[in-house]
Amino acid sequence: MKIKSIHLENFRNFESIDVSFDDINIIWGENAQGKTNLIEAIYLFTGAKSFRGAKDKELIRFGCEKSSLRLEFLSDIREQSAEIIIKDKRSVSLNGVKKKNSAELSNEIKAVVFSPVHLSMVKDGPRERRRFVDGALCQLKANYRKLLKEYSRGLDQRNALLKDIYRHPELEAMLYIWNQNLAATGAKIIYQRLKYLEALTPYVKNIFSGISSNREELDLKYSFYDGIPDLRELEKKLLKEYENSYSNDVLNRTTSVGPHRDDIEILINGKSARIYGSQGQQRSCVLALKLAEAALLEEMTGVKPIALLDDVMSELDETRQDYILNNIKSSQLFVTCCDKETILRLKEGKTIRIENGEVIN
Ligand code: ATP
Ligand code: MG
């Protein structure tokens, strides 16, 4: 898959622009000119919400009623065109045919995105790391989202019961059902996550080692279970955890164990990247995870996702920047930066200069 060009009208700070792309694209300009806005526009064609967490109406250019976005792309040697109109709600069409919702585009256009907001994957608590793995699995396995929903429903029920037991201890016997229920669904979730991490790890290690010129080694460790999973064993272990946490959970009126609390530890040379990693190392970790996600997605689906890398270069030294600019060839690459030096070191590719919402040739 390859993006050929994009046309934007009244999107963010763009009044009207047309940009065509190469295999490697450096989007360059000073602060607040529209670089991230351009990356964000491309990403919307994956059917996802803005990676910056923006609401759709915030994407419409100030003072305008609607935004129009059109993307020309190549898939299986076929030229296609996708269109998004953002007004009161989003409407989407593919090759002139209206689609039910924007998620339908996700089958056509796959992308991984890195933005500074994703640094929270390494810097913050476990929620963002779980979200990364769950998001990747949702793209790969049709039933995984359903599994997450089912677990979440079960969890709500167990938590509601814990609150009731606090006042009516005679309800305790009912907890058994919810423990079993959660253990069955929860084990399936953990099983999928472990399998995914098992497949992802060689890719992450390889990319991270490249970024750090073979000086550093990255490892991933799932908190609940170490090693190759066995579903029955996982379920038994999880059930025991729910049973053992009983008094604690009644006291706190919430479920303290399970896949909704698990963590994926990121280690550099055996030490926690969250606690000990430098800024550049943390950035390299997230980048390696994102690029590994793309490589694995390609291996498993046969679709080459594009890579959208927003502001990855800052805090990285020259060797790390060079590796990213010149060694990641597995997919079409879009990189934003403020710094002219970065562009001068790019050995191939196209430079797109953005100034105040316009493309300067
Ligand atoms: P940096 O290098 O600082 O990351 P950038 O080039 O990535 O800068 P963008 O995040 O793309 O900058 O934003 C460019 C400008 O777009 C900002 O000044 C912002 O005020 C403006 N902007 C954001 N949303 C809208 C909107 N809905 N309408 C008009 N302008 C907007
Ligand atoms: Mg930006």
Image (cartoon, rainbow, N blue to C red):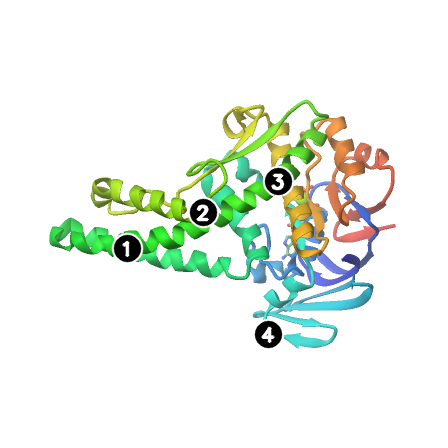
Can you identify the residue that label 2 sits on? 190
Q: Hey, what amino acid is under mark 3?
A: Leu
CA gap between label 1 and label 4 equals 37 Å
Which comes before the other along the chain, label 1 or label 2? 1
Q: What is the number of the mark on residue 289? A: 3
Residue 117 appears in the figure: no
Q: Can you give x and y, in whole percent of width and height, for residue 131 in the image? A: 50, 47
Can you identify the residue that label 4 sits on? 100
Which comes before the other along the chain, label 1 or label 4? 4
Q: Nearer the viewer, residue 116 or 9?
A: 116
Which comes before the other along the chain, label 2 or label 4? 4
Q: Can you give x and y, in whole percent of width and height, for residue 334 in the image? A: 75, 47
CA gap between label 3 and label 4 equals 32 Å
Q: Nearer the viewer, residue 3 or 204?
A: 204
Q: Can you give x and y, in whole percent of width and height, for residue 257 in the image? A: 34, 43
Name the residue at 31% across, 42% down: 241
Q: Nearer the viewer, residue 246 or 234?
A: 234
Beta carbon at label 2 within 8 Å of ligand 2:
no
Which comes before the other along the chain, label 2 or label 3? 2
Q: Pointer 4: residues within 10 angstroms few (<14), some, or many (20+)?
A: few
Name the residue at 79% across, 63% down: 76
Q: Hey, what amino acid is under mark 1?
A: Trp
CA gap between label 1 and label 3 equals 35 Å
Name the residue at 26% across, 40% down: 244
Name the residue at 70% across, 41% down: 31
Which comes before the other along the chain, label 3 or label 4? 4
